Amino acid sequence: MGKPVKATIRGIVWKGWLLMATWLVCSYHTGNPAQPPPAVLALYKKADRLFHLSNPTDATDSLAMAAYGQIIALAGKTGEVPDSMLFYAHKHMGILLDVQTSYSPAIKAYLQAQRIKQQHPQWSDSLLYEIAEHTGSAWYHLNNFDSASYFLLQAEALAQRFPAIPEKERLYNDLGVLYYENGNYLQSRNYFTQAL
């Protein structure tokens, strides 16, 4: 075979390998789809509807928790749940556990939501405000004042970065109570005043 024929065959083989590699990369399933399967989406909508009821009950909260739990389990098994959906599933699960005074499992759910956000630096850091505020509050209820202070001060820093964040009065009230419990009455009064 002459050099031109070898070069042509080498070019065809090279382009074939390049085409196959491109196809493999494009068809690779990353485990974080943009659009979840219809069954997962329906389950999430059901959980979200139950979570946002204007008059929730223990029964509706339990149903919402069960649905969020299924979504979280599906994410671990199949990877068919987008991270954005998984973030809110963990966050809302934490809130529901918090309402039931199950503070330790609530903290685990909040921290899982925080880990998901940290995997996506392109998401706004304002998403972490509510996570930090709830986590700090839950630590306070478990009498772990150092951890409560850490998360509540993190929430305060986020509130300063993002002035439009709602429910700042809850944060300032929590910080006021925390400082009061620690005997810093002046700082406590400052936060209670901000809460008002």
Image: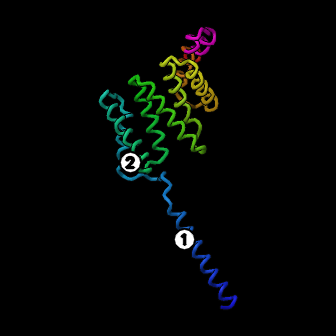
Circle nearer the viewer, 1 or 2: 1
Q: Where, quadrant-wise, is the C terminus in this rendering?
A: top right
Q: Is residue 188 covered in magenta?
A: yes
Q: Is residue 136 above or below residue 39?
A: above
- The residues colored magenta run 178-192
Counting labels gives 2
Does dot 2 land on a helix, a strand or a loop? helix
**Residue for point 46% across, 34% down:** 91
* Residue on which disc 2 sits: 41
Q: Is residue 67 above or below residue 102?
A: below
At label 1, counting other C-alpha atoms closer than 10 Å, the crowd grade (few under 14, some 14-19, many 20 or more) is few
**Residue for point 59% across, 12% down:** 188
Q: Position of residue 34 (x, y in %)?
A: 48, 53
At label 2, counting other C-alpha atoms closer than 10 Å, the crowd grade (few under 14, some 14-19, many 20 or more) is some
Give residue 191's quadrant in the image: top right
Q: Position of residue 83 (x, y in %)?
A: 49, 45
Q: Where, quadrant-wise, is the N terminus in this rendering?
A: bottom right
Type of the residue with mark 1: Met
Earlier in the chain: of badge 1 and badge 2, it is 1
Type of the residue with mark 2: Leu
Q: Position of residue 93 (x, y in %)?
A: 42, 33
* Residue on which disc 1 sits: 20
